[in-house]
Amino acid sequence: MRVVAGIIAVCLAVAAVPSVAGEPETLFRKGNEAYASGRFMEAAGYYQEILRYGIKDPRVEYNLGNAVFKQGHLGEAILHYRRAALLDPSDGEIEGNLTFAESKRADRVVRPESAAIVKWLVRLQHRLGPDRQAGTALALFWAVILVLAAGLVLPGRWKAWHGWAAVALTVAALVMACSWWFTMNRLQPNRTAVVLVAEVEILAGPGENNATLVVAHEGLDLVIRSFRDDWIQIALPDGLTGWVPREAVAIV
Amino acid sequence: MMRSDLSRTAMRLVFFTLLWFVALCAFAADPVIRTFLKPNSGITDTQVLQFTIQVEKADQNPSIGRLADLQNLGALSGPSPGRSTQIFSGPSGTTSSTTYTFTWSLRALGPGEAIIPPVEIQVGETTYRTQPVRLKVTAGSSAQPRAGVPVPPNQAPEEQVFLKAELSQREAFVGEPVLLTLTLLARPQVGDLNWVDRPDFSLFWVEQVPTDPERERYVTELAGEQYYAFPLERRMLVPTSQGSITIDPYSLQLVVTARSRDLFKDFFSRDRGKRILRKTEPLTLKVKPLPSDSRPRSYSGAVGEFLMSAELDRTEAMVDDAVALRVTVEGEGFLKPVQPPVLDPPPGLRIQEPNSEESTTTRSGKMVSRKTWEWLIVPASPGEFAIPEVRFGWFDPKAGRYREGIEKDLVLTVVKGDGAAAGARPGGRLVPQGTDIQYIKLVEGDLELGSRRIHGEGWFQLLVLAPVLLLPAGIGAGRWYARRTGDLSRVRARKARSRARNRLAAAGKRMDGVEGSVFHEEVARALVEYVGDRFDRSSSGLTYDDVERLLVSRSVPADLVRRFRDCVEACDFARYVPASSQTGRQEETLREARDVLAQMEKVL
């Protein structure tokens, strides 16, 4: 009797688990259809349902960002575009929509100008993405090993070339590995938060009785410094730090 | 004589018994409670009084009640507890008596009668009450000295300390900043400053001006004598209502010590000295109302002298592109409560609520303020738009009339976005930025459960770790290869067969009967050099007997040794007997030589 009851319980448990295979893809298709028909709220509902399955796909985050943007939720749209960019930083469409949405913010963010070489490197990093950088670094690493091995059997006249090739490949592999590390570091989640409400006062301390430093508006991205109860210590793009209530922002 | 001694002894016994009884009674008696006031006469409202309750002969620790309902007196500190014990030694043993004291620091609030009400003291289960203390207070000389009154050189140090509060002006308009400066003037050394009373500024906006008494001290002359002046506090007071406003006195408690030898060094020391109280005279500020006539519509509370400027961050933009309009007002005066100018946007422009930034500093005793408002203007349609004129009004207290700043002629040109126009990105890079977001992603297929990166895959990690794992094998292979290539005798032995074959092949090309001797010489050399290479010996000095010995030493079968020798001797014979060097014979010789070599290779 106990065995039968156990089998029934297991069957019920298995039946209760949503069939992950296939269903999110169906929801995705339905969401796209709703979006195409201009039913943005419905589309956003489908996309959010997909996320409840634990799906972390840049397409879902991107489409959800589009759907909430069309409803006028600027902060939420920027949040989902940022999450999509974390999952696929090399996607130009994600970057384009994020830039467009950020241009609609009330707060004008002026970031410090970087040197041309730094901007070029960052652009290259975006274009390659972390996977290509990791693959390239690994390929270069193996090339170094093969060149070193070849040096053992190569005739004497190749020795000089072989040494220079090994040095050049080692430098290239190290540069690519560092670039990959920085890219991964930048793409770590839980580093930034986005303001979701129309405006929020950034206070000098974690509590309503603290002085207001500045008022931030919807869509502004804030760098997270620390957490304390229901408050988050953040830094603004210009370096000013303050505290905001948790319910006013969402963590990317 | 005997009776007399007995009587004396009995008397002594009675005396000590009585003494013991008296002592016992004394210890069992009620505690003695006394009160002291210091000073107990000539009390002024500038002095600090010490009120002490002393409890003697208490068999338990007394506890003291609150000093409440003081009349014309204020408590500065206390009660400060104290305890002292006296020990008595006598014939009956050692006894001790403990005295407890409780001391308050008080100050008189003004001339007239002052009363210290009874204070309750609890000793064990019993509660005692002190008698009320009444004292007469006269006015003391605490405020600044009147100008022109000479200060005698032999005056006590505490008489050479003054506290002075002054306003930068006695009359002001509502909203006009007035500077309040509090200065301590002292000739002797002072220290341990404690505020007793500070005025209430509820009728003002107050901005604290940073003040450093040590750094800003200066020497000033007062009644013909030089004093050190320490600015203790500066406040910018902005009256919020009209009328005559009285600023209550500051009261400061401080300790005066004898004059230091070096007044410039360590002036605010903590040397013990006489504790005194100083307070300022009350100040009166007459606040005038702002005139109501000719007040511009743009006036929103600014009083002072200001300049206004307005600018757009760019004059050309696309539809839906945000443009910032900044209006800055700066000058002498107070701008904190001032509201932003009202903008009346024309059709086609959406103007969002402004952000504001402000800063306030003090320059030469004047409050200098700067306030900037920034509006985001979003054009909804293309065209040329005149930004609504910006007006900012303020009241100029020097001129006694209102003024107004006007900024106009700001024009914004808006072009229609075509979806591929270039827009500035925060990072400064130009990227395509249309008038709408790009469409959703339609590529369907398996959705990812997480951001699986390539570096998390097993094969990737294996490829990263493989060189580490293969390192020992690589090192072993390298060493083996180096050993092989470094041993010349081994290399020579390994190449012996290929060299012999090459030589036999070269000999075969000369197998035409004309160069028979050359052919046989090549064959013989091939065989002998093969053995030389195999045994790492020079073939030049190698005789056939040597060759035979070498082969035997390696256990080469005797018949193979004999065939080898027959072959090389046949070659020698043919070199010198050309008749024997016919083509058929040469082929046979060559075949035999190759076969011998093949057999040798198997054995060696």
Image (spheres, helix red, strand yellow):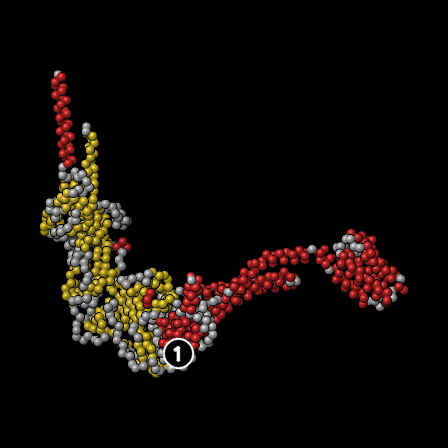
Taking the spot 19% from the left edge, 56% from the top edge, the residue there is: B198
Residue B535 in the image: x percent, y percent?
76, 55
Taking the spot 56% from the left edge, 58% from the top edge, the residue there is: B469
Residue A75 in the image: x percent, y percent?
35, 71
Residue B42: tell me if it is visible.
no
- Give the chain of mark 1: A
Taking the spot 59% from the left edge, 63% from the top edge, the residue there is: A146
Q: Out of B468 and B130, give the one closest to the viewer.
A: B468
Image quadrant containing the C terminus of chain B: bottom right
Q: Mark 1 points at which residue?
A: A34
Residue A98 in the image: x percent, y percent?
40, 73
Residue most extreme to the bottom? B383
Quadrant of residue A101 in the image?
A: bottom left
Residue B367 in the image: x percent, y percent?
25, 65
Secondary structure beneath dot 1 equals helix
Give the amino acid type for the residue marked by disc 1 in the picture. Answer: Ala
Q: Out of A130 and B185, give the one closest to the viewer.
A: A130
Q: Out of B66 and B592, give the one closest to the viewer.
A: B592
